Image (tube, rainbow, N blue to C red):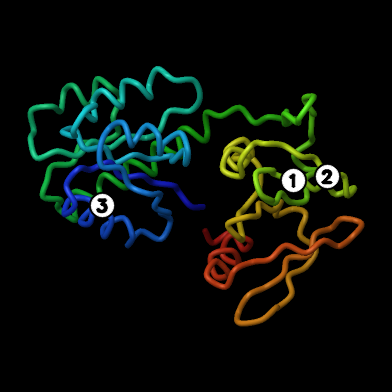
Amino acid sequence: MKMYVMIAEDERLGREELSYLLEQEEDVSLCPSAENGEQLIQLYHEYKPAVLFLDIHMPGLTGLEVAETLRNEEGDEPVIVFTTAYDTYAVQAFDLQATDYLLKPFDKARFDTAMKRVREELQKKQQKKRKIDKLIISTENKMVVVDPFQIGYAVREGRQLLLHTLTNEVIETKMNLKELEEKLAAFPFYRPHRSYLVNLDAIEEITPWFNGAYNIVIKDKNKSQVPMSRTIAKEFFDVLQGLN
C-alpha cells in the first residue's frame, strides 16, 4: 500500500535531491513540499501524510519545534525523519521520538536504511491499532454508525464525500477522502482513482474500459461502477493478488 510522504526543506536543491530519492520508492506517494515550518503545519493538516522528512533548520519554526507541535496534537503522530547538515541535534531529534536522522548531503545507502526503519515503524503503528468494528460518520445533522464491510465505495463530489453502501444507501459527510482512508486503514480499502475509495471485498468484477483504464463493478444492487485510472492499474492488480 502507498505511504504518503511530505518533505519540509527550505533549500531548493535539498528538496529536489530528497524528492528524487523518494520518487524511486514504489510504495511512496509524495505530497506537496513545504519550505518553512508554518507552511508545513498548514500542509500537514491538509494532506495528513504518514511520514515527514523534516529539515531541522528552517525559517520561522524549526523542524524540532514543528515536531513538538505535532506531537502535542490529537490523533496519529507522523513518522519523522529529521534531515540536517549538522550532527549536533541527534539527541534532541530522538528525544522527539524521531525514527531516523539523515545528514546532508544524502547518502543513498543511508537513505535506504532510513526507509527500512520508516517501513518498520509504520508496520508497528498499524499492528498497534485496535481493529474497529464500526465507523462513526458525521453528517450534516447527526452521527451515523456504519459497518465498514457494508461500504461498497466512497466518492468525492465537490466538497462532499458520498459513502455508497452495498444496499445502495448514500451517506453524505464533509470528511475528506484521505481522512476516511485513514479511518479504514485496518480494512481492505484501496484508492483506484484520486476521487474514489473502494472496498476490495465488495468487488464483483473488473472490466476493461478504454486507453488501458478499467471499471470496477461493485456487488451492490445497482452493480455500481468505479473508474480505475490506467496509471494505478498494475499496482491495483498486485494488491488484489497479495503482491503489494
Number of numbered discs present?
Answer: 3
Badge 1 crowding class, 10 Å Cα cut-off, few under 14, some 14 to 19, many 20 or more, is many
Q: Given the current orientation, which residue lies at the most extreme bottom position?
A: 211
Badge 3 crowding class, 10 Å Cα cut-off, few under 14, some 14 to 19, many 20 or more, is some
Q: Are marks 2 and 3 in contact (CB under 8 Å)?
A: no
Residue placed under numbered mark 3 in the picture: 112
Q: Decide which of tag 2 and tag 1 comes sooner along the chain.
A: 1
Say left or right for 112 vs 198: left
Say left or right for 157 vs 109: right
Residue placed under numbered mark 1 in the picture: 162
CA separation in Å, label 3 and label 1: 39 Å
Q: Are marks 2 and 1 in contact (CB under 8 Å)?
A: yes
Name the secondary structure under disc 1.
strand
CA separation in Å, label 2 and label 1: 6 Å
Residue placed under numbered mark 2 in the picture: 170
| Above or below: residue 240 compared with residue 158 | below
- Say which quarter of the image contains residue 81: top left
Q: Decide which of tag 3 and tag 1 comes sooner along the chain.
A: 3
Name the secondary structure under disc 3.
helix
Q: Amino acid at mark 3?
A: Asp
Percent coordinates x, y for residue 10 in the rendering: 20, 42
Name the secondary structure under disc 2.
strand
Percent coordinates x, y for residue 89 in the rendering: 13, 27
